Each structure stands twice: as C-alpha cells, then as structure tokens.
Image (cartoon, grey):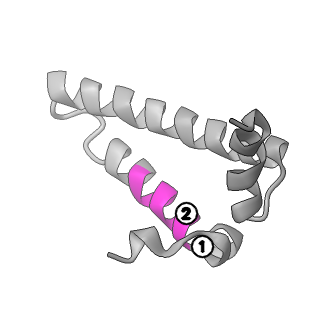
C-alpha cells in the first residue's frame, strides 16, 4: 500500500496542499467541538445556547458548499 496516497490524493482532489487541508480540517473540528459543547449546555439548560450549535453547523455547511471548497469538492452533498 502506498502510504503517501493517504496524505496527498484527497487534499489534491480539493486543490489544497496537505498543510492547507490539515488547517481546514482542524478548523472544522474545532468548530464542531464548540457546537457540541453548546448543544450539551443547551441540553442541560434549555434557555442557554438556543441557536449556538445550529448557527455553527449552518456556517460550516456554507463554508463547505461555497467558494473554492465547493468548486473542487465531489458532488457528494448534492444528494
């Protein structure tokens, strides 16, 4: 198995270097973690963080489906 393929092919498929892709993915992970915390807080105290998690998820969706990322991404979100 060509280990290099795991680090090069996918970032290249979205027109990014490994470093650019890592930064983007880590940014998404951090935002999802924050959304998760907001959702957990909301579960315990419903009056808090009423829209925090959904706003973050919507922002991530917009980021993923517009601009450079959308133009280079496979059409897997269209279905």
Instruction: Please check the rendered image and state whether residue 77 is part of the magenta-colored stretch, yes or no.
Output: no
Quarter in which the C terminus is drawn: bottom left
- Up-down: is 10 above or below 40? below
Query: Magenta part of the protein: which range?
Result: 57-65
Residue designated by label 1: 70
Distance from disc 1 to disc 2, alpha carbons, whole Å, reads: 6 Å
Residue designated by label 2: 64
Q: Report helix, strand or loop for mark 1.
A: helix
Residue 74 image point, x, y percent: 55, 71
Instruction: Please check the rendered image and state whether residue 58 is part of the magenta-colored stretch, yes or no.
Output: yes
Quarter in which the N terminus is drawn: top right
- Up-down: is 46 above or below 57? above
Callouts 1 and 2 close, C-beta under 8 Å: yes
Q: Main secondary structure of the magenta part?
A: helix
Pick the residue in front: 27 or 43: 27
The disc, 1 or 2, on the residue closer to the chain's N-terminal end is: 2
């Amino acid at each position: 198995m060509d280990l290099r393929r795991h680090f090069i092919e996918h970032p290249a498929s979205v027109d990014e270097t490994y470093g650019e892709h890592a930064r983007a993915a880590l940014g998404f992970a951090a935002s999802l973690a924050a959304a998760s915390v907001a959702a957990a807080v909301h579960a315990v105290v419903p009056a808090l963080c009423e829209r925090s998690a959904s706003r973050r998820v919507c922002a991530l969706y917009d980021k993923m489906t517009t601009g450079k990322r959308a133009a280079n991404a496979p059409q897997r979100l269209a279905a």
